[in-house]
Amino acid sequence: MATPNPTNIFRILVASDVHLGFMENDPIRGNDSFVTFKEILSIARKNDVDFILHGGDLFHDNKPSRHTLHACLSLLRQYCMGDRAINFEYLSDESADFKHCKFPTVNYKDPNLNISIPVFSIHGNHDDPTGQNNLCSLDLLHTAGLVNYFGKSLPLDKIQISPLLLQKGDTRLALYGLGSIRDERLHRMFVNKNVSMLRPKEGQNSWFNMFVLHQNRSKHSATNYIPEQFLEDFLDLVIWGHEHECRLQYENSHVEYNPTQELYICQPGSSIATSLSEGEMVPKHVGLLEISGKEFRMKAIPLQTVRQLYMDTVTLADHIDPAAPKAKQKSEEFCIKKVQEMIAKAEKEHTGNRDQPSLPLIRLKVDYTGFEPFTSQRFGQKFLETVANPKTLILFQRQKSCKAE
Amino acid sequence: MATPNPTNIFRILVASDVHLGFMENDPIRGNDSFVTFKEILSIARKNDVDFILHGGDLFHDNKPSRHTLHACLSLLRQYCMGDRAINFEYLSDESADFKHCKFPTVNYKDPNLNISIPVFSIHGNHDDPTGQNNLCSLDLLHTAGLVNYFGKSLPLDKIQISPLLLQKGDTRLALYGLGSIRDERLHRMFVNKNVSMLRPKEGQNSWFNMFVLHQNRSKHSATNYIPEQFLEDFLDLVIWGHEHECRLQYENSHVEYNPTQELYICQPGSSIATSLSEGEMVPKHVGLLEISGKEFRMKAIPLQTVRQLYMDTVTLADHIDPAAPKAKQKSEEFCIKKVQEMIAKAEKEHTGNRDQPSLPLIRLKVDYTGFEPFTSQRFGQKFLETVANPKTLILFQRQKSCKAE
Ligand SMILES: [Mn+2]
Ligand SMILES: [Mn+2]
Ligand SMILES: [Mn+2]
Ligand SMILES: [Mn+2]
């Protein structure tokens, strides 16, 4: 157990992009998302947090399998129900805040449910509302009483976001949420001044204003992201979901600061690598956020159960003469050695947590300009017992595409 | 509210084959299954029952849509959670009785859940366990704490059914359950004496022994059903799911008696017509079962929200001379009149319950031997506003197939 949870300080476990069910049918990696979700819930419990805030993409698939849904219900019931007292008040109108839900209430106030850790979540683009009645998987969890699903907006041309108002001792938290909306559309709505954030009427300056959203933060195209300058000045902290790179330890600080906007932005990143990319290589953390009055601090807690991911790029011509005898064989031997080194590194850097999988994800990008590529499938089979992704272990590329990512 | 629930008498709401989600995408009939499930739950509440016993096929589809699952969670939370005290004891070992479940407990004893009406259900052939981890939809409901899913057997060659042991005052109830198994397979297991029912060790003769199963009762082929004589002699009452014909008012008695077996068999039938057949036309009821010591009585409670179903058969040649002028037109006019009569009958017999749909299901079977059939699709379009099933309203058949069902 960490230090006791003081009566004036909101302590919040911040996580995002848990992607439950990712590759659930893979015999090696199928369990990864659940293992780390369990770790996150147990971190929340150990740190005696007031609640968990999740930034969207709780599920990887819009229609999660029965297995995934069952595993999720099961973990939430196991970790979030129980006798722990909830020590913060709910000041705003539940029936308005959750008017999109069949049960427009916050779960910990329901006398029929004994909640130990409330979970608040917005939806992401992976688990957004669709189909009959515009429901999403979070609606199932909300109606089951295990999650508080907020930030759902109706598909209209204007969005008014009103905050959940929470109070703990003297600390007053206005929590704004906006579930994922197609970036182009939301971008246009911002440009047209059709997104507004309502402010609490009373003691407006006494609130700590936090906003959680799930959108592109990096600029994919002119309008296919949400520029930070679109965000309201009065916000004290933004929790940015969807971007999988964990930036909780960005430049040695735990929260990025945008000086133009005078805005703190926390990007928790995903808790599982859903692609073999540089961003996913950044060590995964969750945030332990403490808010006291208008002040906050964020502590990054490393996740110890995330499957390790190592990537490297080699240019064969830098090491082997393409004209030399047996150049192809030599190039293959060279790559084998490289992969073996990465596996050895993974072994050395394993957290020791028994729930961290032992087989790492390894990706070797090979610039084979001037060489004949060897069979990547056969190459992968040499590592069936030692890497988690033998089929995607090696990626051949030619010089021109071999730029820094 | 009915008479108070006495302290020595188990009062149980018996229902089966609710088929949630049946035709959920039909604009007219899509809501039917939910409306009647809600009625059943409200009957249970009104009658202050100790629990609800459901005989399988709670869901129509093995993988219910999100909408259906959400509607079910929602109704269960609305009707089965609350402050009503549970007045019976659970004597057997929950961890053994529910060992197939992630939470091997009965929901009303969980201190984190405030259950007002426990629901016990076996699975049917429509919602049986499949896929990864052999889960079914009832596992989701059980793990969400809203249903007690029992009677799951592992896919082995032998089945041992041990009862849930429940006690209320002096009345002791041994409740045996067996979720749906392929009839051929279960038939063979019975023949090979591989199905056994365990008896309580203590005071064996003091228990009321009830068995709920979900199998073919009528003989489809030599081995594709479960003959009543397979059932154990010691059973006091069998609740037979899967057969959709409601037999709660069979031959003026509420429970059928098999004199050879000295066995009472209650067939609640479905709460929604999933086919246009004679069996489904029998008025739908649920059973209010009272058990006191070794005695029981069953009261049939009519369901008032079930969409009305009327079927009739006409032989055109009995009414019109096929050789007469305009015979085809006359035959169509005759059928129109017949359907109108049935619609009028439905209007007259509507229960008046505002949740009972106003458009009836009508099926006219037409023996058109000697006649040229008219277009059934065009015929149906005349009744778009007055019947629920214009597309399946009329069924043409020739003499040879026109036998009694
Ligand atoms: Mn994501
Ligand atoms: Mn996303
Ligand atoms: Mn059925
Ligand atoms: Mn059935």
Image (spheres, coloured by chain):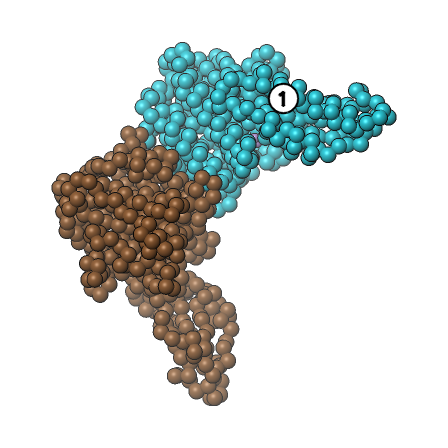
Chain colours: A brown, B cyan
The percent coordinates of residue B231 (x first, y second) are: 57, 24
- Work out whether B256 lies above or below B391: above
The percent coordinates of residue A272 (x first, y second) are: 36, 56
Write down the chain letter for disc 1.
Answer: B
Q: Nearer the viewer, residue B340 or B121?
A: B340
Give the quadrant of the C terminus of chain A.
Answer: bottom left
Rendered residue at 24%/63% (across/down): A250
Rendered residue at 79%/29% (across/down): B328
Can you see residue B106?
no
Q: Residue type at mark 1?
A: Ile
- Work out whether A17 lies above or below A88: below
In the visual, does B41 lie left or right of B310?
A: left
The percent coordinates of residue A133 (x first, y second) are: 45, 39
**Mark 1 CB in 8 Å range of ligand 3?**
no
Element at label 1: helix
Q: Nearer the viewer, residue A386 or B405?
A: B405
Q: Nearer the viewer, residue B196 or A310?
A: A310
> Where, by quadrant of the figure, is residue A74 drawn?
top left
Q: How many marks?
A: 1
Rendered residue at 30%/60% (across/down): A227
- Work out whether A252 lies above or below B260: below
Q: Nearer the viewer, residue B136 or B157?
A: B136
In the visual, does B93 lie left or right of A239?
A: right
Can you see residue A295?
yes
In the visual, does A181 lie left or right of B268?
A: left
- Give the labeled residue for mark 1: B343
- Work out whether B112 lies above or below A317: above
> Where, by quadrant of the figure, is residue A350 drawn?
bottom left
Question: Within 10 Å of the Cα at label 1, are there few (<14), some (14-19), or many (20+) other Cα atoms?
Answer: many
> Where, by quadrant of the figure, is residue B327 drawn?
top right
In the visual, does A262 lie left or right of B211?
A: left
The percent coordinates of residue B188 (x first, y second) are: 62, 34
